[in-house]
Image: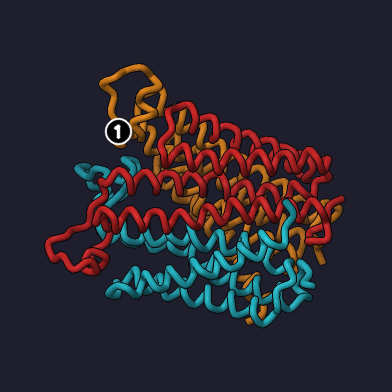
Chain colours: A cyan, B red, C orange
Amino acid sequence: MANFNFDDPLFSQFAFYSGVVLMKTVVMSVWTARHRFGSNTFANPEDCKVVGDKTLKPRFDNQDVERVRRCHLNDLENVVPFVLIGMFYILSRPHPAYALLHFRIFAGARLFHTVAYLTPLPQPSRALAFGVGFLVNVSMAASVIMAGKF
Amino acid sequence: MANFNFDDPLFSQFAFYSGVVLMKTVVMSVWTARHRFGSNTFANPEDCKVVGDKTLKPRFDNQDVERVRRCHLNDLENVVPFVLIGMFYILSRPHPAYALLHFRIFAGARLFHTVAYLTPLPQPSRALAFGVGFLVNVSMAASVIMAGKF
Amino acid sequence: MANFNFDDPLFSQFAFYSGVVLMKTVVMSVWTARHRFGSNTFANPEDCKVVGDKTLKPRFDNQDVERVRRCHLNDLENVVPFVLIGMFYILSRPHPAYALLHFRIFAGARLFHTVAYLTPLPQPSRALAFGVGFLVNVSMAASVIMAGKF
């Protein structure tokens, strides 16, 4: 049975892949900021003042900014549940190799999802990446619910 | 004192109810997709191309899609903090029966919140469901802050 | 090495600061509701009926409501990853005083971020608060990835 510390191989692997997808998620903020400054698209009057153009007003219609924001929100909807469900999952006595496969597939799918969203690649690239990550979450959540007590 | 593994009854119960509300949260994505395809409402140009209608443009004003999206975001705002706060809470030596009551009330309130939002039921159904879940989170967070060290 | 329970000083400190920033995050919902009722700005037809004005329609353009919502979403994007990354981080054998510094700086930066966003204070107040919290997350995530196994 896995333990909740870095001496446990499964925990160490889960920590690595969780760290990678969480790092990717927090970095999306920088990507949004880059597009906001690149297109002078800001959401608040006090932000507009920074660039020194007094005629600038808050805008919410730049499609590059909105695309990154949608990608970021999609991470919150999928990466955050992955880490939360995974914390229970590694303690539910999964076969270690099978569990590791879940983590690797999820991390790969979510990294590809970001590439597919921001390039953008033609569909169904992004839909497939999303679907694979979604199925990993559902599979782990089902294991957790079955291991838990009502 | 509770331990962080499935041999501990309180952990097992927390895992079960967390698994249920997290599963419900990730499934909201499928519900959004269902409404997007049902109404040909897509957020990206590359998504519009999939359905084969070349005149289709990204749209953000379908009220069924937006309703599911608001419900999903409300889950991120409440279910995710529940699981995070709960992980500390079960280790803060709560009375086990009292803690279990927190988990059951939260899970019931959030399942009802989704029904109330998507039906939609007349207010204050949804507001009550939200309020009950909110109070569970505040109660658990207060216990965690008092058990923690400055 | 830190353990995952309240007998461990580092865990207790991480629990305290996580409890504080999570409590702050969930309370944002109340702040949004306050502004919705104060300006009769509701997102759903069934919500409009509650205030008894039959001519009221859903609106999404009140800048006070939207400002609180942006602040809340920014918390989801930063506070939630902090707690998730931190759970691994405290188990990755950081120097305890260095780890505690991370938690205190993060909590201070995020509390100030909320004040800067809702007042609003002139920029770059909010940008600095965001940046400091972001760097704490990146620093902890880097430690986790290096402690984990591929």
Residue A92 seen in render: yes
Compared with B143, B72 (above or below) is below
Question: Who's the residue at 31% across and 36% down the image?
Answer: C60
Task: Answer left or right for B39 relative to A127.
Answer: left
Where in the figure is residue A67, as x and y percent of width and height?
32, 60
Compared with A19, B139 (above or below) is above
Q: Locate residue A18: give its quadrant.
A: bottom right
Where in the figure is residue B67, as x and y percent of width and height?
37, 43
In which quadrant will I find the N terminus of chain C? bottom right
Where in the figure is residue C134, as x and y percent of width and height?
52, 58
Residue type pointed to by label 1 = Arg
Instruction: Count residues near mark 1 (Cα–Cα under 10 Å), then give few for <14, some for 14-19, many for 20+.
Output: some
Total numbered circles: 1
Question: Who's the residue at 37% across and 69% down the image?
Answer: A127
Question: Who's the residue at 79% across and 72% down the image?
Answer: A1
Task: Answer left or right for B86 relative to A44.
Answer: right
Quickly name the residue at label 1.
Answer: C59
Where in the figure is residue C15, as x and y percent of width and height?
72, 49
Compared with A9, B64 (above or below) is above
SS for tag 1?
loop
> Who is closer to the viewer here, B12 or B88?
B12
Q: Locate residue A82: give its quadrant.
A: bottom right
Task: Answer left or right for A68 relative to A90.
Answer: left
The residue lying furthest to the left in this view is B55
Compared with C49, C143 (above or below) is below
Question: Who's the residue at 24% across and 69% down the image?
Answer: B50
In which quadrant will I find the C terminus of chain C? bottom right
> Who is closer to the viewer here, C15 or A40?
C15
> Who is closer to the viewer here, A112 or C2?
A112
Q: Chain of mark 1?
A: C
Residue A62 seen in render: no
The residue lying furthest to the top in this view is C52
